[in-house]
């Protein structure tokens, strides 16, 4: 059993720049043949339907099943729509804010961490977390169990700015682990980052398999002045013994592998 997932984030469609890495993305997909594409939010830049549709068209054009969760840029910026039609456009284009992929070797649960009264911070309502935990238990025991949400749990390696980690992240992480999660992926910080829980926490419950937190570099670039902000994506690969995270960065022509970490699953 091998599961392979391509994770991209933060396309920020609609900010005006041509979407340059598309050909390179197609080449990487042809090369790696992932079974699923996971998109962790900020597909649009100002939450407009046309932007969301542009992103959805791009994702569909890649020819893979995909799962997308919303980011803080995917809801209306203006009042009252921000509160009265928070996810209306997203649901019209993508169907749901909490997608699920359940296959033999891979279960991916999408969670919606966007709240209209927050701009940068994210949170999960208790009942939505409980719903996600129940869904994580679908699929066979040896399936890779993955959670996808926009907001990061681990701090970014470089710029931090106003982007605080997900609210109540300790409680959320504990709950997701108890439900069987092995891999929690997000975006929002526009920086690649990979951490295993035992690298920063002593576990009361003793040894258990790895819990990996990963953020993908942004694949879009919403702020032209940030010319040094890397664009890229992650690829996750799991077999019975190990889970590997590979990070790719776009060099202006191709998506090049710039890092790889492997964790034991057993
Ligand atoms: Fe973003
Ligand atoms: Fe974001």
Image: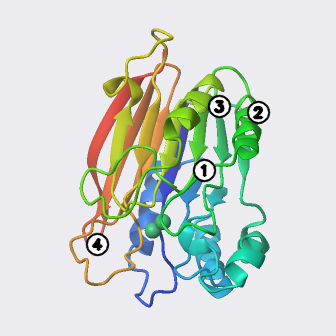
How many badges with numbers are in the image? 4
Quadrant housing residue 207: top left
Mark 2 or mark 4: whose residue is earlier in sequence: 2
Q: Is residue 147 above or below residue 187?
A: above
Q: Position of residue 162 (x, y in %)?
A: 36, 64
Earlier along the polypeptide chain: callout 4 or callout 1? 1
Q: CA distance from mark 2 to mark 3?
A: 18 Å
The secondary element bearing badge 1 is classed as: strand
**Residue bearing mark 2:** 134
Foreground: disc 1 or disc 2: 2
- Judged from the image, the secondary structure of the residue bearing numbered disc 3 is loop
Q: Which residue is mark 1?
A: 36
Question: What residue does disc 3 label?
Answer: 105
Vertical position of residue 29 compared to residue 2: above or below: below
Q: Is residue 43 visible?
A: no
Tag 4 and tag 1, C-beta contact below 8 Å: no
In the image: residue 100, left or right of residue 19: right
Going from N to C along the chain, the mark reached first, 1 or 2, is: 1
User: Which quadrant of the structure image shows residue 244?
Assistant: top left
Front in this rendered view, residue 122 or 247: 122
Residue at mark 1 to residue at mark 2: CA–CA distance: 21 Å
């Amino acid at each position: 059993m091998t599961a392979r997932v391509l994770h991209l984030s933060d396309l920020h469609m609609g900010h005006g720049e041509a979407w340059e890495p598309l050909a390179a993305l197609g080449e990487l997909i042809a090369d790696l043949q992932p079974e699923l594409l996971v998109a962790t939010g900020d597909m649009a830049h100002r939450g407009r339907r046309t932007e969301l549709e542009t992103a959805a068209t791009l994702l569909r054009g890649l020819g893979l099943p995909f799962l997308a969760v919303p980011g803080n840029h995917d809801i209306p910026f203006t009042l009252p729509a921000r509160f009265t039609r928070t996810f209306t456009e997203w649901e019209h284009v993508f169907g749901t804010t909490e997608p699920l992929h359940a296959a033999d070797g891979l279960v991916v649960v999408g969670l919606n961490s966007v709240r209209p009264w927050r701009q940068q911070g994210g949170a999960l309502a208790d009942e939505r977390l409980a719903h996600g935990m129940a869904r994580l238990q679908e699929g066979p025991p040896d399936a890779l169990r993955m959670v996808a949400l926009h907001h990061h749990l681990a701090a970014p390696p470089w710029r931090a700015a106003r982007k605080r980690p997900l609210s109540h992240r300790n409680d959320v992480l504990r709950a997701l682990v108890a439900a069987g999660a092995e891999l929690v992926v997000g975006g929002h910080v526009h920086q690649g980052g990979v951490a295993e829980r035992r690298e920063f926490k002593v576990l009361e419950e003793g040894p258990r398999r790895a819990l990996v937190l990963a953020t993908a570099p942004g694949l879009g670039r919403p702020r032209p002045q940030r010319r040094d902000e890397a664009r890229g994506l992650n690829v996750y690969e799991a077999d019975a013994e190990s889970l590997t995270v590979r990070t790719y960065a776009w060099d202006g022509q191709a998506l090049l592998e710039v890092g790889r970490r492997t964790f034991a699953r057993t």
